[in-house]
Image (cartoon, rainbow, N blue to C red):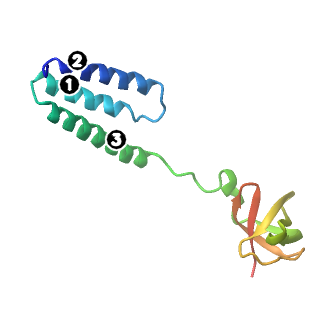
Amino acid sequence: MSTNIWWIWMILAAVFFIGEIFTAAFFILWFGVGAVAAGVLALAGVGLGWQFLVFIVVSFALVAASRKFADRFTKAQPPGIGADRFVGEMCDVLEEIDNAKNAGRVRMNREEWRAESDTGEVLAAGTRVVVIRMTGTHLVVKKIA
C-alpha cells in the first residue's frame, strides 16, 4: 500500500493547485508543493510517517518564506493617502467639542467634519485644533498649545 499512496498525494496536490486558482492569497499553492514532495517520497518507498513530516515541513517552510518575500516587496501605505491625508491639518472648532455629549464640529479648509477631542477635554467654539487621526467619520483633534 505504501507504494500506491503516492497517487493520493498527487491527487491532494492537484486539489491544492486547483484551489489556489480560486484564492487570491497565494497560500494554498505551497501545500500542493508539500504534497508533491511527500508523493515523491511515497514513490521511493519511504514510510508514511516521513511522508507526513516532509509534507508539513515543506509546506510550512514555503509559507514562511513566501510571507517574508511578500513583506519585502509589499510597501506600506504611504502617508497622505486615504484618511491619513487629514493628519496634521489645522481646523477651527465651529461647534463646541464635548465627547460626553457626542457633540462637536470643525471646519477643515472648506469642509465641516464631526470631531472629538483626543484627551476628552471640552473645546470651545473658535479654538484652533490639529487633526491627529481619523476614527470612522470623526476627526480626532488636539488643541494647539
Q: Quadrant of the rendered structure where residue 8 is?
A: top left
Q: Is residue 145 above or below residue 28?
A: below
> Label 3 belongs to which residue?
63
Instruction: Give the residue displayed 82% in from the left and 66% down from the top.
Output: 102
* Earlier-in-chain disc, 1 versus 3: 1
The amino acid pointed to by label 2 is Trp
Which of the two marks, 1 or 3, is nearer to us in this view?
1
Spot occupied by residue 88 in the image (x, y as percentages of width and height):
70, 66
Q: Are marks 1 and 2 in contact (CB under 8 Å)?
A: yes
Which of the two marks, 2 or 3, is nearer to us in this view?
2
Instruction: Give the residue displayed 66% in from the left and 57% down from the top.
Output: 84
* Earlier-in-chain disc, 2 versus 3: 2
Spot occupied by residue 22 in the image (x, y as percentages of width and height):
48, 25
> Label 2 belongs to which residue?
7
Instruction: Give the residue displayed 33% in from the left and 20% down from the top.
Output: 14
SS of the residue under disc 3: helix
Foreground of the two, 70 or 54: 54
Disc 3 crowd rating (10 Å Cα; few below 14, some 14-19, many 20+) is some
Q: Label 1 vs label 3: CA separation?
A: 19 Å
